[in-house]
Structure formats: structure tokens, C-alpha cells
């Protein structure tokens, strides 16, 4: 099968992580896979690795003129002649429908990976979504509640909308006892793009309240983004400024999560947060805001994590205080979280995607194929 996978960019986010795992799975099973993104991407520096058999479509290098750009895209699609186009994230989804349906006759599968309806910058983009998304052959959501929302909000046909959860992260092997530490002994970790929707400003406020009672604890927020300067100013003005750090991006997230005692998810909006799954797989005691989608589909409150009322800084501070105070609770939640992730199967997720491709295209996805050469 010939598959084109479109995504807005390939950086360090969860959507990119899921994308790379999917396309690598398809490439390993002998399908001809091309990945297109709209911002410059370098295989060598990315946190996520693309299989060498995957063809990279450098959409950022196409001609800038409106007519020449459209002609170049149509020529690219005609030459590749995909059996299906799969797309993640808003801009890529609209692009996929434009060139896959309005300007072509290809099968198109779309998926929003963020909190549905909340990352739209303009009325025009809202209108385009509601007009274009219903033209797709299938729309994939990450949770049942997201499916209900998308059917209503985007006016999707229920039979063309399905739920496939994110593939679970691999449970990391134990770190060697003599491995040098990356974090202080009592560390809270958070990670994500330094942007408003991730709520790190609220996390800093919550740690300032709870951390005042626990001077041995530190907070480490990994990631980069447009809010770095604002967050740094907030840290500098905090009474616990010397114990909050913005280390930037990292390729050692698995090792860091294994060392961390607590993981904090302060997001104002989520789709299905991969970083929360990674933290649970590593055995972290997790606390998360109960935003509209995502955390409540992963955490069973008081069993394998703590859920906090949305946007309640004082409640989040109390959750952090409980975890910092109670070592037994931390171990109980962390061990239960790791057991939950170990019980999940990545093969089940891949099988659902394979079945969806077969349903949409009519091609036997699981038929034995010779993998293309790297």
C-alpha cells in the first residue's frame, strides 16, 4: 500500500511521537510510506526517529507562489499516487482535504491530536474545519468523549468517526545503579511546549505554595516555546525561584522520568497526553488537571494518579503537597501506573489502524509484502 502521512511539523511533541511510531510500523511491514511536513525537519536532530525506508516530502521547499505551489503539490500527489492520505493536526488536515478531496480523488483519514476545537486561531479556520473535515473518509479521535464532541462540533457523520487511542509507550528498563543522576533526589518533573495551553504558569504558582513547605524538593519543566521569557520572569519573582528550572528540550526524557519522584501535568487543554503515559510507564506518581479531554481517560483517581479540578491552583498545590509529604502514596500510585501501562498492547493499536486503512481503501493491509530497501 502507498501511504502519504501529513503532519504540520516534526518537533518534540506527542503527535509527532505517535506519527513516527505509526509510519515506522507501516514501513517495517512493507508499505511505501511518505511523510510530508510544512516546517524544516532534520532526521539527525529530531527526538523521534523516522525509518530510513520512509520518503520525506519537503513541503517547506515547494514554490511560494500560490499557483506554482498548488501545481507542485498536485504534481507530487500524482507522481506518488497514494492509496490513502493520513493526516495529523489542523493545518495538515485542511491541506489533506484540499489536495486529497477537492483537488484529487484520494482516500483521506484525518485526526486531531489536540483538545478538539480549542487550538483554532481564527473564525476562518473554524469555518474551514467545519466545512472540510466532513469530507474525509474517516476522522480518528483519541477518546470516546472527543469523538462525541467532534461529531457535534464539526458535523461529522457518526459512521465516519472512530476512536483509536495512542500507542502505549514502552516500559523503560531499570537504570543501572551506577548511572550518573540527571536530577536531584527529590524532583518534580513536567514537560511540554512552553505555551499557554500547557499551564506551566499555574504549575509554578502551585509549586510556590506547596514547595514552601518542602525545601528539599525542586521543579524541572522541560521544553521550549514562546512563553519561555514570561515563565522565567515568573520564576525569578517566585519565593522558591532557586528551586524551579527550565532546562529546555531533552533527548533523555525516559531516563529523567525514571529518576523523578513526581510528574505534574498542568495543561489547560489536551488531546491524549503521551507524556503522561510515558511518566506512568516510568512509575512516576502523577498529578494532572482534569481538563476536558485526556487525563481523565488515562488516570483512575487515587488509584494510579491524582486528578485535580481544572484551573484550580490551590487544589493542584494540595495535590503536590500530598505527594511530596507521603512517600507511601507516591510509591503506591507509581507502581499502579506502571502496571496499567504494562497491561496495554501497542500491537492492538497498530491492528486498529491497519484495519482502518483496509476498511477505507479496500486493500488487504496485512498481506505479506516485501519491505522496500532502506
Image (tube, rainbow, N blue to C red):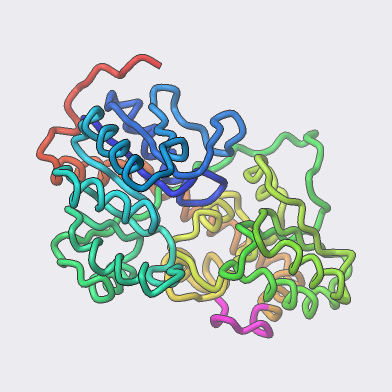
Point out the image quarter for the N terminus.
Answer: top left
Residue at (34, 32) in percent of width and height: 34
In the rendered image, the vertical position of residue 229 relative to residue 95, given as above or below: below
Q: Quadrant of residue 190?
A: bottom right
Per the rendered image, the range of residues in magenta is 307-316
Q: Position of residue 93 (x, y in %)?
A: 33, 54
Is 200 contained in the magenta span?
Answer: no
Q: Position of residue 65 (x, y in %)?
A: 40, 44
Say if residue 331 shows up in the picture. no
Residue at (88, 76) in percent of width and height: 239
Camera-side residue of 314 and 14:
14
Say if residue 76 shows up in the picture. yes
Residue at (74, 77) in percent of width and height: 205
Camera-side residue of 29 and 67:
67
Q: Position of residue 137 (x, y in %)?
A: 17, 53
Seen in the image, is 234 located left or right of residue 278?
A: right
Q: How many marks?
A: 0
In the rendered image, the vertical position of residue 45 relative to residue 65, given as above or below: above
Point out the image quarter for the C terminus.
Answer: top left
| Residue located farthest toward the left when viewing the structure as drawn | 362
| Residue located farthest toward the top when viewing the structure as drawn | 373
Q: Position of residue 36 (x, y in %)?
A: 39, 38
In the rendered image, the vertical position of residue 120 relative to residue 255, given as above or below: below
Camera-side residue of 287 and 9:
9
Seen in the image, is 183 located left or right of residue 358?
A: right
Seen in the image, is 278 located left or right of residue 344?
A: right
Camera-side residue of 227 and 47:
227
Q: Quadrant of residue 214?
A: bottom right
Amino acid at each position: 500500500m502507498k501511504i502519504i502521512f501529513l503532519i504540520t511539523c516534526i518537533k518534540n511533541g506527542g503527535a509527532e511521537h505517535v506519527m513516527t511510531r505509526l509510519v515506522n510500523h507501516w514501513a517495517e511491514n512493507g508499505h511505501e510510506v511518505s511523510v510530508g511536513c510544512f516546517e524544516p525537519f532534520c532526521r539527525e536532530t529530531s527526538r523521534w526517529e523516522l525509518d530510513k525506508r520512509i520518503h520525506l516530502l519537503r513541503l517547506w521547499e515547494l514554490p511560494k507562489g500560490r499557483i506554482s505551489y498548488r501545481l507542485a503539490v498536485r504534481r507530487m500527489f500524482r507522481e506518488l499516487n497514494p492509496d490513502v492520505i493520513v493526516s495529523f493536526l489542523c493545518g495538515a488536515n485542511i491541506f489533506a482535504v484540499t489536495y486529497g478531496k477537492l483537488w484529487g480523488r484520494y482516500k483521506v483519514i484525518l485526526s486531531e491530536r489536540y483538545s478538539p476545537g480549542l487550538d483554532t486561531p481564527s473564525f476562518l479556520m473554524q469555518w474551514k474545519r467545519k466545512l472540510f473535515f466532513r469530507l474525509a473518509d474517516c476522522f480518528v479521535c483519541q477518546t470516546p468523549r472527543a469523538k462525541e464532541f467532534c461529531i457535534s462540533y464539526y458535523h461529522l457523520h457518526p459512521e465516519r468517526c472512530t476512536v483509536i487511542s495512542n500507542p502505549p509507550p514502552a516500559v523503560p528498563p531499570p537504570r543501572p545503579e551506577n548511572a550518573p543522576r540527571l536530577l536531584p533526589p527529590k524532583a518534580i518533573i513536567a514537560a511540554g511546549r512552553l505555551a499557554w495551553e500547557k499551564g506551566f504558569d499555574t504549575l509554578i504558582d502551585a509549586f510556590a505554595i506547596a514547595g514552601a513547605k518542602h525545601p528539599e524538593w525542586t521543579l524541572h519543566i522541560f521544553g521550549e516555546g514562546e512563553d519561555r521569557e514570561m515563565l522565567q520572569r515568573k520564576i525569578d519573582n517566585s519565593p522558591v525561584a532557586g528551586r524551579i528550572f527550565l532546562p529546555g528540550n531533552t533527548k533523555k526524557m525516559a531516563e529523567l522520568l525514571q529518576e523523578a519522584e513526581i510528574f505534574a501535568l498542568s495543561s489547560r487543554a489536551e488531546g491524549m497526553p503521551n507524556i503522561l503515559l510515558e511518566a506512568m510507564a516510568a512509575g512516576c506518581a502523577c498529578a494532572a488537571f482534569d481538563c476536558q479531554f485526556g487525563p481523565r481517560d488515562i488516570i483512575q483517581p487515587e488509584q494510579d494518579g491524582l486528578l485535580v479540578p481544572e484551573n484550580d491552583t490551590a487544589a493542584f498545590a494540595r495535590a503536590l503537597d500530598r505527594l511530596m509529604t507521603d512517600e507511601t502514596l507516591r510509591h503506591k500510585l507509581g507502581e499502579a501506573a506502571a502496571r496499567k501501562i504494562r497491561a496495554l498492547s501497542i500491537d492492538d493499536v497498530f491492528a486498529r489502524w491497519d484495519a482502518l486503512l483496509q476498511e477505507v481503501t479496500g486493500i488487504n493491509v496485512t498481506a505479506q509484502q516485501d519491505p522496500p530497501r532502506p
